[in-house]
Amino acid sequence: MSQIYKVSSGSGGSGIITIDGDIGSVTGSEVGIKATGSSKTGSSFSFTASGSDLDLISTDSNGNIFLGAGVPFNSDGGSSNNVIISGDGTAGATFSASNGNVGIGAECFDALTTGDSNCAFGMSALTALQTGSLNIACGLSAGSSYTNAESSNICLNSSGVVGDNHTLRIGAATGIGSGELNKAYICGITGTNLSTTQLVTNVADQLGSATLVGGTGVTIGTSGSTIVVNVATGGFTWSLYTGTTVIRILAQSGSIPNDDSNLVTMRLPLTANVGDIFKIVGRGLGGWKLEPSTAQVIHLGTQTTTSGTSGSISSTNQYDSVEVICVVANAEYVCTDVVGNLTVV
């Protein structure tokens, strides 16, 4: 704590004032008390004397507060309501037209000129930002990668990425190194019902969303906080054919030929999509034959039918069965799940 002493040298003599500071002292018949200068309290601080009062003023004429040795910020007359508390600054840092910025930490806002409403907390936070606005940076070197007009970002212990806008970044990286994270907990999520079929996705630490969409015969719905997947049981239809000898089968269908006296001819559809499935299960003693349509072939292992209606695959015994899948739209089919010794023509 400073102390002031006044010593008179005889009657009517001039007084000598001594002020002891926390470090050093000043002595003289007249001494100055100052607060300004880059190596003192900060460029916005000053003492104002009037009569017997000596007032410490913390703001400049535009309402800026620059506190800390080595904070030579120059508001240049065009900036207002900025609060910067730092132990170090750059002589070239000039707030030529910046308003409403708050910074606490050495080297924060070293390059800012015209950006508004930024918040920097931590050493070197937003140290290279020049004209960006509405950024929040918290932590060592938070937002330090911003070098120009990056705006509307939030960096928590993250240096950010050049060119970021409207971006939230939390953590320096994923891992176990200094400043890195390998777990994340956010309260208030479990048990919250949003009744949506959207899911949260993650690619290289970037969060996104995807919507579940049902395919053929599948619908997606919600029940409270549960996503429900419904599979239609009618997606594959079976038909029993009795007394019919020629049949054009349909995609996603099963056929049961049931004729004890005659061979039942099954013909593939004229058009089919890749993945369409057809099934034949024998029942009648007359057996069955599967014919391709024009320009179609059927593959059974290493064997392939003749192209078109002159080719066929036929049963040998009453209960021979086969599943056929389209592998080239409208043109090629492959036999799977074969029961019996089928004949290929």
Image: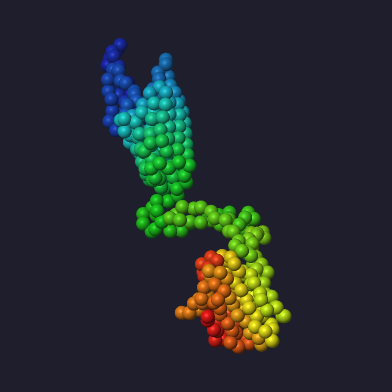
The quadrant of the image that shows the N terminus is top left
Q: Is residue 110 above or below residue 78?
A: below
Question: What residue is at 43 percent from the left and 21 percent from the top?
Answer: 61
In the rendered image, residue 248, in percent from the top left (x then y), is placed at: 64, 72
Residue 87 visible (yes or no): no
Could you tell whether 77 is left or right of 197 in the image?
left
In the rendered image, residue 243, in percent from the top left (x then y), is placed at: 72, 80
Residue 160 visible (yes or no): yes
Could you tell whether 42 is left or right of 219 in the image?
left
Question: What residue is at 61 percent from the left and 57 percent from the top?
Answer: 197
In the rendered image, residue 126, in percent from the top left (x then y), is placed at: 39, 39
Q: In this view, does 21 lie above or below 127?
A: above
Q: Which of 250 and 174 is in front in this view?
A: 250
Q: Which of 87 and 264 is in front in this view?
A: 264
Residue 191 found in image quarter: bottom right
Q: In this view, does 142 lie above or below 110?
A: below
